Amino acid sequence: MYASPPIPPGTVALEDYEQAARRRIAPEAWAYIAGGSADELTLAANRAAFRRLRLRNRVLAEMTGAHTRLSLFGQELAFPILMAPVAFQRLVHPDGEKAMAFGAAAVGAGMVVSTQASQSLEDIAGVARTQGAQAPLWFQLYIQHDRGFTEALIRRAEAAGYQALVVTVDAPVSLRNTEQRAGFRLPAGIEPVNLRGMAPPPPNRAGPAESEVFQGLLDGAPSWRDIGWLRGLTRLPVLLKGIMAPEDAARAVAEGVDGIIVSNHGGRALDTLPASIEALPLVAEAVAGRVPVLMDGGIRRGTDVLQALALGARAVLVGRPCVYGLAVGGPVGVIHVLKILRTELEIAMALTGRARLEQIDRTVFWEEQGAPAGGSAPCTPPRTPV
Amino acid sequence: MYASPPIPPGTVALEDYEQAARRRIAPEAWAYIAGGSADELTLAANRAAFRRLRLRNRVLAEMTGAHTRLSLFGQELAFPILMAPVAFQRLVHPDGEKAMAFGAAAVGAGMVVSTQASQSLEDIAGVARTQGAQAPLWFQLYIQHDRGFTEALIRRAEAAGYQALVVTVDAPVSLRNTEQRAGFRLPAGIEPVNLRGMAPPPPNRAGPAESEVFQGLLDGAPSWRDIGWLRGLTRLPVLLKGIMAPEDAARAVAEGVDGIIVSNHGGRALDTLPASIEALPLVAEAVAGRVPVLMDGGIRRGTDVLQALALGARAVLVGRPCVYGLAVGGPVGVIHVLKILRTELEIAMALTGRARLEQIDRTVFWEEQGAPAGGSAPCTPPRTPV
Amino acid sequence: MYASPPIPPGTVALEDYEQAARRRIAPEAWAYIAGGSADELTLAANRAAFRRLRLRNRVLAEMTGAHTRLSLFGQELAFPILMAPVAFQRLVHPDGEKAMAFGAAAVGAGMVVSTQASQSLEDIAGVARTQGAQAPLWFQLYIQHDRGFTEALIRRAEAAGYQALVVTVDAPVSLRNTEQRAGFRLPAGIEPVNLRGMAPPPPNRAGPAESEVFQGLLDGAPSWRDIGWLRGLTRLPVLLKGIMAPEDAARAVAEGVDGIIVSNHGGRALDTLPASIEALPLVAEAVAGRVPVLMDGGIRRGTDVLQALALGARAVLVGRPCVYGLAVGGPVGVIHVLKILRTELEIAMALTGRARLEQIDRTVFWEEQGAPAGGSAPCTPPRTPV
Amino acid sequence: MYASPPIPPGTVALEDYEQAARRRIAPEAWAYIAGGSADELTLAANRAAFRRLRLRNRVLAEMTGAHTRLSLFGQELAFPILMAPVAFQRLVHPDGEKAMAFGAAAVGAGMVVSTQASQSLEDIAGVARTQGAQAPLWFQLYIQHDRGFTEALIRRAEAAGYQALVVTVDAPVSLRNTEQRAGFRLPAGIEPVNLRGMAPPPPNRAGPAESEVFQGLLDGAPSWRDIGWLRGLTRLPVLLKGIMAPEDAARAVAEGVDGIIVSNHGGRALDTLPASIEALPLVAEAVAGRVPVLMDGGIRRGTDVLQALALGARAVLVGRPCVYGLAVGGPVGVIHVLKILRTELEIAMALTGRARLEQIDRTVFWEEQGAPAGGSAPCTPPRTPV
């Protein structure tokens, strides 16, 4: 049904998919997909932070009956990994989001579809559901300058069977030098089809000596009031994505949102933010269990997933690696990427002696206990919030 | 009017200008301009310190009416970025400081003209003012061994309309191995024209076994007494540039100076000094708001400007990047460099939820709060002075 | 008797053997032997941790009568270094484990023979004993899914004269991307000969949407109950290998084991574990002298051995370097590797003023004492457990 | 008189001499001279520790009458830099130690002549004194297995006019893999001429299974008793070189020595020792001013010298850079190296506002004061001993 090119031999980990995808994706599109903002410090931090964390293994634990199931907003997941929202997936595969949805559904992974999908949200939902999959299907929403169009978009998502709204709040403006240097433009035939028919934004009102940002780009950017408006519009669970500051998380809960996704937009929004995994425990502490906390950013290994769960995430989202799977092997690549990650998570659970997700807590980390040998700097474990 | 060569495509950030300028500037001049002192540890530290700082984003903030205006010594600035004093700008462009002044004035950026300018201070001021610009125009002063000549220089600056004196105090001697290795000499036709007619320094009085430094180079170096003398000579605001130690900042305020510029001379004076941004909060604490504190050294991104303001600077100075802009694109390059930096600052303000400069305080930083995940070493935020 | 190729000139340290072996071993086998799990973070950590530790020298100490002898489980060792269990040594030398045993016996080094040896455990023991060596000969045991076969294996080891059982507990599953990428397969004629005749494992019972790990690979994995069963089966000392967590060490002692080997399986089991040398002092503290603690992982220098002893190890095991010695020079290479390490240990003892192993304690380390010069990060010494 | 090859243009710092020397010295001799022990961790640490230290500049200080003079054991030095003992200087220049002595005397630098000099100690002293130089001339002593010969050597040094004995105590054995790999041997015609006529050491008494180190190489190694013997033999000041541990420093003072040289033998004795500059403040604290403390190891810049003095050294010794000067430019190179370092020290004093050596104390360092900006890890200053 969907093109599934042969996967190169030796492609056994998510980083192998990244290498292979780099050879298959046009350089301009690669700059857009793989790049981050400004100096890409936060992009790099997302990975580096995971590489610094250290686990403690546990031996000879009883693993009978082990599993990775969980429930989220009343929906069942076979494992705590969702496909993150990524725009314009037809950049890497002719069937774009539909091929992605096919792959995700085949392994029972949840999927979050982007406002900027290159295929209609109804078509994508159709693919996801004809597979008979029970996994969550959520819609990612950028609140548009045209609030009426935004409401219509929500109604379409509800009608198409999406089960939650993920409102991205961290990128009203951004600074993407990597894609600018590469001269990235959307190729002919690829566009945000779900935004067709929306009124164009008002013309930039900045005078010659004024600010393009403050007298232009930010017009129409959402504020907390829009979250209240949105919360009143729909009965779907509403999650905010892009929260890093504990204060913002607390405010979001107070505004009635149903979930938080800790994220720095994959290093694509404000550069010099810390890694998502560094913000996660602080946000989790501020939320204090009132709503589920998820995270994305830098997940490449099953040990990363385990660490995120241990620091307060109920589930994680994975973006670029799934796109790389799609680019390399179509839906088969997506399936493979998700299976690798699930299997690696299970291995990490087995080797840390955790038979169920609820058992994954901070004791999985190597703790210094005031007595590490050999200089602790490179393997400092997370500290417990007081 | 001024030569403005085409700017290479993909030149979208200040570091792109640096790469492009390296291809346009003669190697010997490059060594002089881009190099630092000794092992260039401080030169590197200026950039590295900014790269380690981590911000916290804030979402959904109200940004209506946001702007970057400020007032300094009774002068209005559209944004808190000034062109730092840099000597001999004709090394990179035939119109040197005049082309620079034209570019700075076009975007409303303040400019500090060097004692060692390669064009007359009157001509530069003329360009700056014919543009009708309101931005500050300041004169950087090296106190010369000939104090009478120094006084005459001040009178010329006053007469030409300069609005402040920036006295550089951190480099009575220095050690510039990079330019020595490159064999840098001022090319024919480029000289410190504003020092013409000054009496030559007395001959070196060091005997064969004596010290060239202590019995020679330091003769005529200024001391605190000269600051008192200078303070009494002029009604212009006097700033000291090159302060890093809080004790020196406190002394400067006690001596009646009107402003402090935290600087390590762009890594060109004493090597092994810390980054300017590391000294800034200590100096700001010592000054305690009695006079404005500015800083330079390593600013390449709008996030750097935001961080400097958050750590106590009222404004920042940018040197080499403007020179690179001049080398690459003439006044158009200068304008582009300054616009990039201003826009990046505004984006950083928007993504940290700060609508005015006064709102930029230490809460923009990612604070550890005793609970970071993942090992804090690489993203340690600044600590608050007690 | 055994092939001993010429050793390249300039092969004077264990790392030289590694370089030389890389040129002699087929790339697929090299990936299997030298590789670690996943991203090889733990593999790298094992070496990096030793490289960070700093010793303090002591001068003019009395070294008369110095020696490295010790007693372990009633057995005498000339020096505290054993050959670690390594599978399939015929991958690097036609005479495999027998050549290794010959070399180890020649210098009086203890040897631990792997369950996955490529030669019969009886033949290997025969070589070790015909040398007349008194050094310990131990058998490494993977508890097989077939417990009856496992018991028979133990009986064979007892009958062949093995003096202890080393039960590896840290790798019921693992993730070896490096060898997967290299396409490693056991070559024709190399197999785990000591497992011949064992019943095959039951077929994988995982359904299509189920977990290969939790409904398959872990079936038959040992748990603490098996340790009790094993402890009752034999009168040989039983050591558990692969302990990193102090809790597991305490449990092992409570279960009646006779020794602990701190190990992360040479970085081949769970990636993101800390270095073995970082776990050692915590395990030693938990064990509190009730049974001997040994360690392996990253030992390449005599100073590493000294540091391990100072942090609580009675002896160390060395795996890959001995295999590299075997690959490069046959038994002569093994002898050379072990002699280098022993001599380096003696030099380290001499230069830290320790005439006997019992004198090697934490005072060999450079302690900060609150007063290091120059930034302590890279040379942080181990801290004493409270 | 002595061969002085032309010095390449652009040779303006000690590291330039190192680069140039590498091109002039035979690879085997380079491995011997530039190499360290084992993995050269300590060799690298000596430089890295200085590169981490951060100074604070002071501006506008009064520098009238500034100088670098000091008195040591009743001898006057124009500046606090001595030529460290280095063996076999004829490896790099046909006139070896005599050319070195000529250069050192020409600039008034003290010199320590090695027991393993490749020229007679009397000839070297003759060169040093015919220059009319007043700078210290000291003799470095390895206590030989033949104590009678050792005493005779001391008598020769006294008779030749050496003014102090520097007893090296940190290298009774060592591990020089770099020079082993390079196959270094003393070329024909170069030998330790001052040891001619000494009885050969007793044959190695180690049996085949015994230790070459403990039953061989260490026979005849000196102990504290030998220091007492030596102290009673001569009226010259006796310094111990190679002390890193404060306990050893305290013991040395108690044994009546006249000075301590903190040193790790330039990274050539026990690898994994910290940098000399890291040990210096601890040793200085233990000595508490009872005898002068000197240091060597890693000095390449005037700022390094300033930092060493600030951490407790009365003077520093410089080895390899002087040898590189000799290799590159004969005595002229030596003179240039020493002048560069002296001038750099003076610049560092001027820019930190220190007019005399006594003013160089810990306030020259950038102190954190609990409030650095930007993450302090890379510029951590030294902490004050409690």
Image (cartoon, coloured by chain):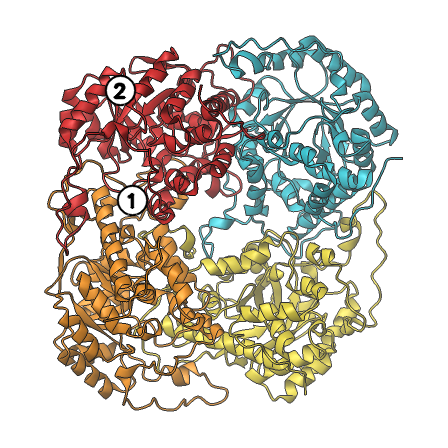
Chain colours: A orange, B yellow, C red, D cyan
Asked which secondary structure carries label 1, the reply is: loop
Task: Specify whether D337 is left or right of B14.
Answer: right
The residue singled out by tag 2 in the image is C164
Q: Residues within 10 Å of mark 1 (few under 14, many from 20)?
A: many
Extreme-front residue of the structure: C188
Coordinates of residue C82 in the picture (x, y in percent): 37, 23
Helix, strand or loop at mark 2: loop
Residue kind at label 2, given as amino acid type:
Ala
For the residue marked with disc 1, what is the amino acid? Leu
Is residue D199 something one can see in this rendering? Answer: yes
Is B25 drawn above or below residue D339 in the view shown?
Answer: below
State which quadrant residue B134 falls in. bottom right
Pointer 2 indicates a residue of which chain? C
Q: What residue did someone put label 1 on? A: A55
Q: Residue at x 81, y 32 (%)?
A: D94
The label shown at residue A330 is none
Residue B243 versus residue B363: which sits nearer the camera?
Answer: B363
Instruction: Report x, y in % for residue D286.
Output: 54, 28
Dot 2 alpha-carbon crowd within 10 angstroms: few under 14, some 14 to 19, many 20 or more: many
